[in-house]
């Protein structure tokens, strides 16, 4: 199946959560916001990439041409955006109003509210507005990506001359202007109501909101640049001027104004999306911040793992490996604490860590800086090419360098996506011991509250040797391929996964227990899919838990009859990657950073670690079985490529929610706060 359409169907599942009236109301609004933000990034990267290939004549690894893919994307996206708008106007907005939270337009305001907004406009909005007229001496202004704008037609009453003008809604302003904590007005409505002040003495004939999405992918030739950071900074400046990939307009826009926008922006029909206002519903995330707990998921307090309670962290990990699952188990008391203790412990002599994405106020970065200032050897690999976090990561890299950390930017031609940390500590007997963390998610305290991820803490000498070897590869020159407990891309991971699949096929042929269970965010790699089809034709049961895009077809007679595909979306973003191979009854279990995509297997540094503790292996196998169970609520992928959501059984009873079930797991002891 087509990868891009597969991704759009994932975003459709996000939309279905917004449409689900059994979800808490403000969470439904947040899902509408997430749908909008997801779609923005999809156009900025995936659609932009297809358009670039179309323009340059570069072929794509697909059975469809770029033009055919763009047409299919346009058709599906138009349908989804209309459905998104309908969900907001017909369901979420009326339900919000019933709960006392109203998004009102200017004509719905009371006199006192209008007076308040007049004052607010003069004080807060007017000083940052700049109207741009378009005439022979004023060319059409540049419209930056993801900006909200007003297209205004004005007429000079003295000359009768008509003029087009554009006003950009400044990004410093909130999406909705709050009146009293319960009533909100779209910011463009407030600006529109004051157009006579911006065009004094002119007649305002019409005005309409519009929004542009641009190509935001970066192109840096690492082989041709002497300074990757400077080259990337220049590309970031150019990102704002990328070519248009989508034009969103209010459905009430006149043909005349739309014709001007089409001509000046170079938009073709399939790039134009007419939707009911207000545009940019990503701003609904603002409403989710309201103090209305009864309209949200119950607050959850992540717990500290039992083993760490009142025990020395390093002593616990020395004794036995520790497997944690966020956000059910606290990121702050495990991963953050690990780095913080390493920074402050006088016995720690070195810290090495990868950073792919982190938060703006990262305590982990602060700990690394503290460690460097304390004289410890600190090496940080900052992946400055992490998409949409480039500027943030450049800033962190410079801050770390200024503190005395050794900062490297990874391997030329590859993104470093693995999540690993290595702490070298001198023990009481004078020996050096390595303490390790290998995770499935980023070292980001913000996303760790909503992203589901696993992390393994280990003092196993084999894992320590592996991480030392891997860091030496990342910071120096090495072509090491084989590790002890790690599988590392791009040199060995694909080969190892194919070997594991073949091993399951051979075991099944010998009558031994054989089964494949995989949890990933995306499954689009053709070689892996072909291998899974081969396993299915041989009779091996294959369970696939895929959150996002999946181009494999399950349940096709003679091809994939033993393959089942599930997707689970909910309060938390399922982000961990888990690989379980039955191995004749002694499961081989891996966790790590890699999805099953060509970029992860061939163009990134990824790491999976083998889980060896029997109880931890059993825990991960049980998680996979829980997700795949018919009694668990999920989306199921059909042979024709459609997804069916099952939330109730045949008797009408609600199916078990996986994330709610995990909150009561004996490993986690999560409590509601």
Image (cartoon, grey):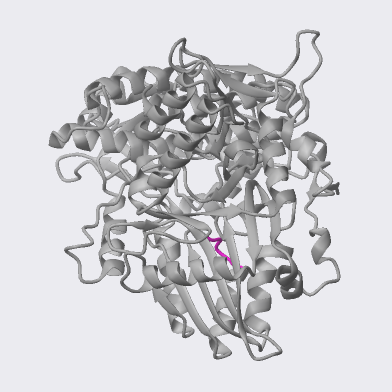
Is 54 on the left-hand or right-hand side of 576? left
Q: As rendered, which of 541 and 174 lies closer to the eye?
A: 541
Residue 468 vertical position relative to residue 214 in the rendered view, above or below: below
In the rendered image, residue 383, in percent from the top left (x then y), is placed at 41, 62
Read off the magenta span: 358-362
Which quadrant would residue 8 be assigned to in this image? top left
Residue 565 vertical position relative to residue 399 in the rendered view, above or below: above
Q: As rendered, which of 380 and 393 lies closer to the eye?
A: 380
Residue 105 vertical position relative to residue 382 in the rendered view, above or below: above
Q: As rendered, which of 609 and 402 lies closer to the eye?
A: 609
In the rendered image, residue 87, in percent from the top left (x then y), is placed at 59, 20
The answer to if 467 sits in the magenta stretch is no
Please identify the quadrant where the N terminus is shown: top left
Which quadrant would residue 134 be assigned to in this image? top left
Is 617 on the left-hand or right-hand side of 642? right
Which quadrant would residue 551 be assigned to in this image? top left
Residue under the image location 77 percent in, 45 percent down: 291
Residue under the image location 27 percent in, 27 percent down: 62
In the rendered image, residue 489, in percent from the top left (x then y), is placed at 40, 53
Residue under the image location 57 percent in, 25 percent down: 541
Residue 201 in sight: no
Q: As rendered, which of 492 and 6 lies closer to the eye?
A: 492
Residue 521 in sight: yes
In the rendered image, residue 503, in percent from the top left (x then y), is placed at 48, 37
Is 208 on the left-hand or right-hand side of 320? left
The prevailing secondary structure element of the residues shown in magenta is loop
């Amino acid at each position: 199946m087509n990868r891009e359409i597969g991704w759009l169907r994932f975003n459709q599942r996000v939309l279905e959560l917004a449409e689900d009236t059994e979800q808490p109301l403000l969470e439904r609004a947040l899902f509408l916001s997430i749908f909008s933000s997801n779609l923005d990034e999809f156009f900025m990267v995936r659609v932009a990439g297809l358009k670039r290939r179309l323009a340059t004549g570069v072929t794509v690894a697909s059975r469809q041409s770029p033009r055919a893919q763009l047409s299919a994307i346009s058709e599906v996206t138009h349908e989804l955006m209309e459905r998104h708008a309908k969900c907001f106007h017909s369901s979420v907005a009326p339900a919000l109003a019933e709960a006392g939270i109203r998004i009102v337009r200017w004509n719905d305001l009371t006199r006192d509210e209008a007076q308040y907004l007049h004052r607010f406009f003069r004080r807060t909005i007017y000083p940052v507005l700049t109207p741009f007229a378009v005439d022979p001496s004023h060319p059409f202004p540049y419209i930056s990506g993801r900006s909200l704008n007003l297209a205004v037609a004005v007429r000079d009453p003295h000359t009768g001359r008509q003029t087009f003008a554009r006003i950009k809604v400044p990004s410093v302003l909130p999406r909705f202007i709050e009146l009293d904590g319960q009533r909100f007005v779209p910011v463009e409505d407030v600006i529109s109501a004051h157009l006579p002040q911006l065009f004094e003495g002119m007649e305002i004939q019409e005005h309409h909101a519009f929004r542009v999405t641009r190509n935001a992918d970066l192109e840096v030739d690492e082989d041709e640049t002497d300074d990757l950071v400077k080259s990337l900074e220049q590309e970031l400046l150019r990102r704002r001027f990328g070519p248009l990939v989508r034009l969103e307009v209010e459905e009430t826009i006149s043909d005349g104004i739309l014709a001007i926008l089409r001509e000046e922006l170079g938009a073709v029909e399939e790039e134009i999306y007419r939707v009911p206002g207000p545009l940019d519903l990503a701003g609904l995330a603002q409403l989710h911040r309201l103090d209305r707990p009864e309209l949200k998921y119950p607050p959850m307090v992540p717990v500290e793992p039992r083993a760490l309670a009142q025990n020395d962290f390093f002593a616990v990990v020395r004794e036995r490996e520790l497997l944690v699952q966020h956000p059910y188990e606290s990121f702050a008391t495990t991963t953050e604490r690990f780095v913080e203790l390493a920074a402050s412990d006088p016995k720690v002599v070195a810290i090495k860590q990868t950073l792919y994405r982190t938060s703006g106020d990262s305590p982990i970065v602060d700990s690394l800086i503290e460690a460097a200032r304390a004289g410890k050897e600190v090496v940080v690999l900052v992946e400055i090419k992490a998409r949409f976090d480039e500027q943030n990561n450049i800033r962190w890299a410079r801050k770390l360098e200024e503190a005395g950390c050794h900062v490297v930017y990874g391997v030329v031609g590859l993104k470093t996506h693995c999540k690993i940390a290595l702490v070298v500590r001198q023990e009481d007997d004078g020996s050096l011991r390595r303490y390790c963390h290998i995770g499935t998610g980023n070292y980001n305290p913000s996303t760790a509250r909503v992203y589901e991820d696993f992390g393994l803490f280990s003092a196993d000498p084999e894992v320590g040797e592996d991480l030392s070897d891997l860091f030496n590869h990342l910071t120096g020159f090495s072509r090491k391929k084989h590790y002890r407990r790690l599988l590392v891309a791009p040199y060995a991971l694909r080969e190892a996964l194919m070997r594991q699949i073949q091993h399951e096929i051979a075991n099944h042929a010998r009558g031994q227990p054989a089964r494949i269970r995989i949890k990933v965010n995306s499954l689009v790699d053709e070689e892996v899919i072909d291998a899974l089809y081969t396993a299915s034709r041989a009779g091996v049961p294959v369970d696939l838990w895929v959150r996002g895009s999946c181009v494999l077809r399950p349940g096709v007679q003679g091809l994939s009859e033993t393959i089942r595909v599930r997707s689970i979306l909910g309060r938390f973003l399922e982000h961990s990657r888990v690989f379980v191979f039955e191995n004749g009854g002694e499961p081989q279990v891996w966790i790590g950073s890699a999805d099953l995509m060509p970029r992860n297997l061939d163009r990134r540094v990824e790491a999976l670690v083998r889980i060896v503790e029997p109880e931890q292996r059993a825990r991960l196998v049980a998680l996979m079985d829980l997700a795949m169970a018919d009694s668990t609520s999920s989306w199921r992928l059909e042979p024709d490529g459609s997804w069916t959501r099952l939330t109730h059984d045949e008797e009408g009873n609600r199916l078990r929610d996986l994330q709610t079930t995990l909150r009561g797991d004996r490993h986690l002891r999560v409590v509601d706060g």
